[in-house]
Amino acid sequence: MYVRFPLSLRNVEDLLHERGIDVSHETIRFWWNRFGPLFASEIRKRRVYQMRSHSNWRWHLDEVFVKINGEQHYLWRAVDHEGEVLESYVTKRRDRAAAYKFLRKAMKRYGHPEVVVTDKLRSYGAAMKVIGNASRQETGRWKNNRAENSHLPFRRRERAMHRFRRMRSLQKFVSIHASVFNHFNQERSLSKRDHFKLNRAAALAEWRILCAT
């Protein structure tokens, strides 16, 4: 529940108490730190090969501002044309070196995209020149809406958690949150209700098997 929904640790504590499970929010924090990376790793193993076959057509890249102990950091995110979160990466700067590390990390896992849609931040173009695919970059006022909209689930989580205290904690959380979001992301507005219900039931059944193991 803590990973799937925009809940605080104390919210989950109260929900479990209603179900007869008496645990502290610190116990839930321990469970999250212990099992969250395992769940995310299993999800990525099952999805990464499927995503490589179609996610390298068009990528949407964008960065958001994140405050850590009052200091501004940058969360770089890459999503494909279907809204699947491919990669998340936290840096202190948003220069060419940071953009290059982010792109190399994403390409190492998912391959080279046919088209890369970005905003007008010059760091993207400079990094893509080093990589050698600057000709595949596209920019435009409305072209990157897919990436802009993909930030909303993270922003809801950020508010529920009252922001973050360390870069390491932020990097860990966004990696796990992205994997779980991909698993349950059904694009309900683009499919019929019956089809959406079948996909949602299948995702929930797979999630329960994953948590049981």
Image (tube, rainbow, N blue to C red):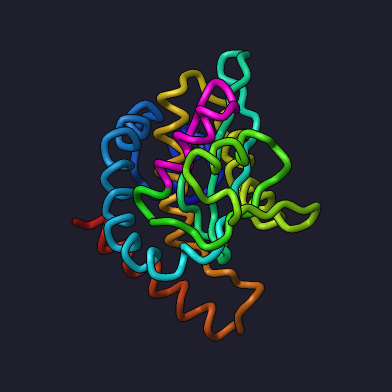
Percent x, y of residue 182: 46, 58
The residue that appears at 42% across and 53% down in the rendered structure is: 180
As drawn, 88 above or below 71: below
Left or right: where does residue 125 sit relative to residue 36? Answer: right
Q: Position of residue 144 (x, y in %)?
A: 70, 54
In the current view of this chain or complex, which residue is farthest to the top? 70
Q: In the image shown, does 22 or 127 lie closer to the viewer?
A: 127
Count the labels in the image.
Answer: 0
Considering only vertical position in the picture, is 64 above or below 186? Answer: above
Q: Is residue 188 visible?
A: yes
**Residue 149 in picture, x, y percent from top left:** 68, 53
Q: Residue at x 57, y 14 (%)?
A: 69
**What span is in magenta?**
88-106
* Residue 14 visible here: no
Residue at the extreme right of the image, as rendered: 141
Q: Is residue 93 magenta?
A: yes
Q: Residue at x 58, y 42 (%)?
A: 154
Between residue 30 and residue 83, name the one nearer to us. Answer: 83
State the residue lying farthest toward the left.
213
State whether residue 11 is above or below residue 180.
Answer: above
Image quadrant assignment for residue 187: bottom right
Residue 34 is covered by the magenta coloring: no
**Quadrant showing the C terminus:** bottom left
Is residue 208 rendered to the left or right of residue 172?
left
Q: Residue at x 44, y 32 (%)?
A: 171
- Quarter location, residue 70: top right
Vertical position of residue 104 compared to residue 70: above or below: below
Where does the image place residue 5, in percent across and percent down from the top left? 52, 49
Q: Nearer the viewer, residue 138 or 168?
A: 138
Comparing 79 with 171, the one in front is 79
